[in-house]
Image (spheres, helix red, strand yellow):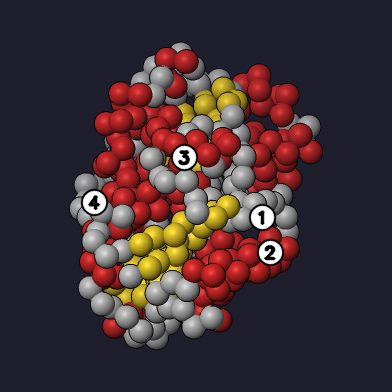
């Protein structure tokens, strides 16, 4: 069996690392790895391939940044050429990025079955580009690998046949379990930043809904500045966020209050997440990683796809409309004892279940 895996962004590299490791150890399976170049600089791309020991991509499409239509269109054209050349039995896509949608569309138009890892997530906010990507990809896919019961229920409500839905767990949890010991051994990020464990906040901000909206951006950073008077705040700065801070003349001020650092690799991020007192983020992946390491999380968005984290008491969703609301939420959760213990994302064997399903003949 021959598969083409399409990835393009940091979260997908992590997910693909877990699945590809199993696929490449499975007899009779050949995987071709395609990197669209959605995340193209070393801090957002190459370092992850090195640390996660992912083989170098067989194809690097070098698409780069651009508007959603421009970027997705270029990816669609380039992925189609790869598929015409490779003629795979399956195309495997991950998550909800433009790379995900482009890979799925290119495959389905060539009548190649698509398997979607992390299917069924819904924010129910159609203004989010990610929501459109994930819905369209789910409905184009032949097999939908759902990470949670809530994701399965979302797919059922959209009348997707039960035979196409597979509850496998979350491959990011697989990665977290596999790489945490390596991170503890190899990362020196806490020492380099002179951070004391459990005595700092880790913050990440990158979604367009926050970076492209001046009011929301100012509410987030105004709230973080208030909290930074009491506890250090570490903020790896996404390229989009850096540009937004420069646009709003906030970068110099933010650098006075926070540990502003360049984006970090996966192992350093694991250490920053695992040993934080609190995490503030608008990232879906970071919300989950916070839970994997049982660190309370404040999500700086209007909603979350990972509703089980809110239900379990580990996550609080705070729409960043006012800096006082952001500051209050962060202050109030600094001493949050944590939520209930549970295993909503499986037992760390999602990749094995995905490989078994694909190799076992679950075809169109």
- Asked if 165 appears above or below 253 in the picture, the reply is below
The answer to whether 253 appears left or right of 258 in the picture is right
Q: Are marks 2 and 1 in contact (CB under 8 Å)?
A: yes
Percent x, y for residue 275?
A: 35, 27
Q: CA distance from mark 4 to mark 1?
A: 33 Å
Percent x, y for residue 92?
A: 42, 66
Q: Earlier in the sequence, mark 3 or mark 4?
A: 3
Percent x, y for residue 259?
A: 56, 22
What residue is shown with label 1? 63
Q: CA distance from mark 2 to mark 4?
A: 35 Å
Q: Between residues 320 and 246, which one lies in front from this camera angle?
A: 246
What residue is shown with label 3? 48
The answer to whether 256 appears left or right of 169 in the picture is right
What residue is shown with label 4? 348
For the C terminus, give its image quadrant: bottom left
The answer to whether 333 appears left or right of 178 in the picture is right
Residue displayed at 47% across by 73% down? 87
Q: Earlier in the sequence, mark 3 or mark 2?
A: 3
Q: Are marks 3 and 1 in contact (CB under 8 Å)?
A: no
Q: CA distance from mark 3 to mark 4?
A: 20 Å
Q: Between residues 232 and 147, which one lies in front from this camera angle?
A: 147
Mark carried by residue 74: 2
Q: CA distance from mark 3 to mark 2?
A: 24 Å
């Amino acid at each position: 069996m021959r598969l083409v895996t399409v990835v393009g962004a940091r979260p997908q590299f992590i997910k693909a690392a877990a699945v590809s490791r199993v696929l490449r150890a499975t007899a009779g399976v050949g995987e071709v790895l395609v990197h669209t170049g959605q995340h193209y600089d070393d801090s957002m791309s190459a370092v992850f391939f090195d640390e996660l020991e992912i083989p170098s991509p067989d194809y690097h499409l070098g698409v780069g940044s651009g508007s959603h239509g421009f970027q997705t269109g270029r990816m669609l054209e380039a992925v189609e050429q790869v598929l015409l050349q490779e003629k795979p039995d399956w195309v495997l896509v991950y998550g909800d990025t433009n790379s995900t949608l482009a890979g799925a569309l290119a495959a389905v138009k060539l009548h190649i079955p698509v398997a979607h890892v992390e299917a069924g997530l819904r924010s129910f906010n159609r203004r989010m580009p990610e929501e459109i990507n994930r819905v369209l990809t789910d409905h184009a896919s032949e097999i939908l690998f759902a990470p949670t019961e809530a994701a399965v229920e979302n797919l059922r409500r959209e009348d997707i046949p039960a035979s196409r839905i597979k509850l496998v767990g979350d491959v990011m949890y697989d990665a977290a379990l596999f790489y945490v010991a390596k991170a503890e051994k190899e990362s020196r990020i806490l020492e380099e930043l002179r951070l004391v464990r459990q005595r700092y906040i880790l913050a990440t901000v990158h979604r367009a809904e926050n970076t492209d909206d001046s009011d929301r951006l100012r509410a987030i950073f105004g709230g973080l500045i208030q909290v930074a008077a009491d506890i250090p705040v570490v903020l790896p700065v996404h390229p989009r966020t850096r540009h937004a801070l420069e646009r709003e003349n906030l970068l110099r001020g933010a650098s006075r209050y926070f540990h502003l650092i360049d984006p970090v690799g996966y192992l350093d991020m694991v250490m920053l997440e695992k040993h934080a007192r609190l995490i503030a983020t608008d990232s879906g992946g970071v919300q989950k990683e916070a839970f994997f390491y049982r660190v309370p999380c404040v999500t700086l968005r209007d909603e979350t796809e990972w509703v089980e984290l809110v239900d379990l008491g580990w996550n609080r969703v705070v729409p960043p409309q006012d800096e006082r609301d952001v500051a209050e939420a962060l202050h109030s959760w600094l001493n949050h004892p944590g939520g209930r213990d549970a295993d909503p994302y499986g037992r760390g064997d999602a990749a094995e279940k995905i490989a078994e399903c694909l190799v076992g003949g679950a075809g169109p």
